[in-house]
């Protein structure tokens, strides 16, 4: 399945907040690769984030959290950022608060 990839305002904000242009470019490039078979990339998330998927990017440090709308063939990048388990800056912590 080929999809269009969109970034939410939150994802755009977090992407632009990354100071390193190289990392920013790599993250954006990885997000755009989700247009080809996004359901086969990343892993499905559970609990509070059920319905979303997560894919690793930029040397495994960063995560891109996205949602697939199969009926419209769209992929929505909800947020992205560094994985810091146990830290409130952790990308999964931020994503779980977006739905509240």
Image (cartoon, helix red, strand yellow):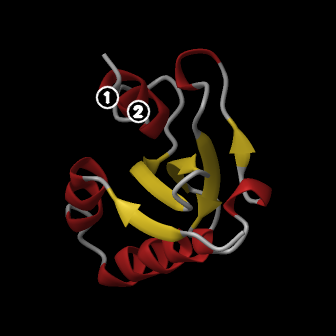
Which residue is depicted at the point 43% across and 35% down? 90
Q: Identify which residue, 10 or 88, lies in the foreground.
A: 10
Task: Count residues near mark 1 (Cα–Cα under 10 Å), then give few for <14, some for 14-19, many for 20+.
Answer: few
Seen in the picture, residue 41 relative to 23 is either above or below; the reply is above
Q: Residue furthest front?
A: 71
Residue 99 sits in quarter: top left
- Cα–Cα span, label 1 and label 2: 5 Å
* Numbered-mark total: 2
Q: Position of residue 24 (x, y in %)?
A: 36, 75
Side of 25 where 38 appears, left or right: right
Seen in the picture, residue 28 relative to 89 is either above or below; the reply is below
Q: In the rendered structure, are the residues bearing label 1 and label 2 in contact, judged by CB atoms less than 8 Å apart?
A: yes
Q: Position of residue 37 (x, y in %)?
A: 73, 67
Q: Position of residue 29 (x, y in %)?
A: 49, 80
Which residue is depicted at the point 57% across and 69% down? 3
Q: Which mark is residue 74?
A: none
Q: List the residue tagged with mark 2.
A: 95
Q: Identify which residue, 79 or 59, lies in the foreground.
A: 79
Seen in the picture, residue 90 relative to 16 is either above or below; the reply is above
Residue 20 sits in quarter: bottom left
Q: Residue furthest right?
A: 40
Which residue is depicted at the point 23% across and 70% down? 19
Residue 88 sits in quarter: top left
Q: Which mark is residue 98?
A: 1
Which residue is depicted at the point 56% across and 61% down? 73
Q: Which element is circle 1 on?
A: helix
Side of 55 where 43 appears, left or right: right
Q: Which element is circle 2 on?
A: helix
Quadrant in which the C terminus is drawn:
top left
Q: Identify which residue, 70 or 86, lies in the foreground.
A: 70
């Amino acid at each position: 399945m080929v999809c269009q990839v969109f970034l939410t305002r939150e994802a755009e904000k977090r992407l632009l907040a990354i100071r390193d242009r190289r990392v920013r470019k790599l993250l954006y490039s990885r997000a755009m690769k989700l247009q080809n078979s996004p359901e086969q990339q990343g892993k499905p998330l559970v609990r509070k984030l059920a319905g979303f998927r997560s894919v690793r990017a930029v040397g495994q440090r960063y995560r891109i959290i996205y949602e697939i709308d199969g009926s419209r063939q769209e992929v929505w990048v909800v947020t992205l950022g560094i994985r810091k388990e146990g830290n409130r800056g952790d990308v999964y912590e931020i994503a779980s608060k977006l739905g509240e």
